[in-house]
Amino acid sequence: MKHRLALAVILVAYVAVLWVTAPAIGFTRDEGYYFKAAGEYFGWFAAVLEDPAKAVSTSTIDAYFTYNHEHPALVKLVQGGFHALLHDTLGSTSHAQGYRAAGFFFAALTLFATYLLGRVVAGPVVGLAAALLMTAMPRFFFDAHLATFDVPITAMWTLSLATFWWMWSAQPKVVSSRALAVGVIFGLSLSTKLNALFLPIVFVAVWLHEPPAPWIPRLAKDAVGSRVLTLPSIPLSLVIIAIVGCLVFLATWPWLWPDPWPRLLEYLRFHLRHEHYPISYFHTLHVEPPFPWSFPWIMTLFTVPSGILLAAVLGLVERLPGLWRRDGRSMLLLAGALLPIVLISMPSTPIFGGTKHWYNALPACAFVRRGSRNER
């Protein structure tokens, strides 16, 4: 109970600080797009109440959801909901504060998810410490004021990691039922931002590293005599997560409904061919790939407080031996922390921003020690 009370105090205090300081922070370029999109998207619910059949027609969906369809709908719907409640209904905020309140919510959700991840892998004390470390990240604190997607995907990425381990470390008889919950969280993550498409890499890495049943990789002959690498049977839980996640993703993005496959491909193509924003890096202006692989690592070095960075490095180093012991928690945290940075460091990756694009690495980096191993 005392840990939950401490967490509640942290969450309330953090949101209160964000609420008070947000009006002094100017608008970023992206926010203008999202303010408009949030208002239009949430307006669709009025159309649903007026004429449900017409509301799901292609013409109506396109009228409300075509704008800014290069990003999924969930965050903009939440932004629109907060604005409708706080500004339109209660009249207690400005237009901007109403939309930005969604950012405060997702910032608090990030702290909660960080605590939850710490709790399931190492205990509540570590979870509280990690949540406190997140409050001390200056760049994250700045973006937590804004109506953008980078803090929301940090929350959902971390919540996905936490719920995945909650499922993976459970007794076999409850794994499938817990997989349904993980699938919902994964689907909501997909509906938050593109980063979530890489979560299956983490899930599969944990599965191969600590499979439900013992497995030794070996080469075996197939029916035609060729040697192939044997893999363990795919767990039902991963299949459930994939199916439920895709269904939730589709259900929460109405723009996909009229023509799901072509529109999904359009969404993916937009990001695969994303325009390149100029980046000045050590007095060199980079305007197209290949970008320096060191960019996200050096930017992390300069933007994360040195004490937190040192604790993160020590914690990650401490986790490395766990890989040899086939400790799935170590794989979960290492993959969850390093994958977002590795993806950005690939020379062919478009660089269209800075540290915000790997915020989702920070919560997993915040764990500074290993907890006792929970046997399944």
Image (cartoon, grey):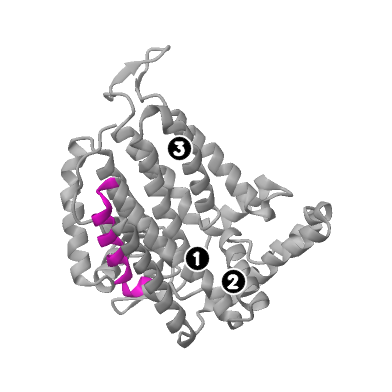
Q: Nearer the viewer, mark 3 or mark 1?
A: 3
Badge 2 or badge 1: first in the primary sequence: 2
Q: Which mark, by number, is residue 149? A: 1
Q: Main secondary structure of the magenta part?
A: helix
Mark 3: which secondary structure?
helix
Mark 3 touches mark 2? (CB < 8 Å): no
Q: Is residue 126 magenta?
A: yes
- Rendered-image quadrant of the N terminus: bottom left
Residue 284: % across, % down: 33, 76
Give the residue type that dot 3 points to: Arg
Q: Is residue 276 visible?
A: no
Look at the image and give the residue range highlighted in magenta: 121-140
In which image quadrant can residue 164 be found?
A: top left
Residue drawn at point x = 19 percent, y = 41 percent:
322
Residue drawn at point x = 28 percent, y = 23 percent:
214
The residue at which mark 3 appears reads as 178
Q: Is residue 221 above or below residue 167?
A: above
The residue at which mark 2 appears reads as 34
Cα–Cα gap, marks 3 and 1: 27 Å
Residue drawn at point x = 42 percent, y = 76 percent:
16
Give the residue type that dot 2 points to: Tyr
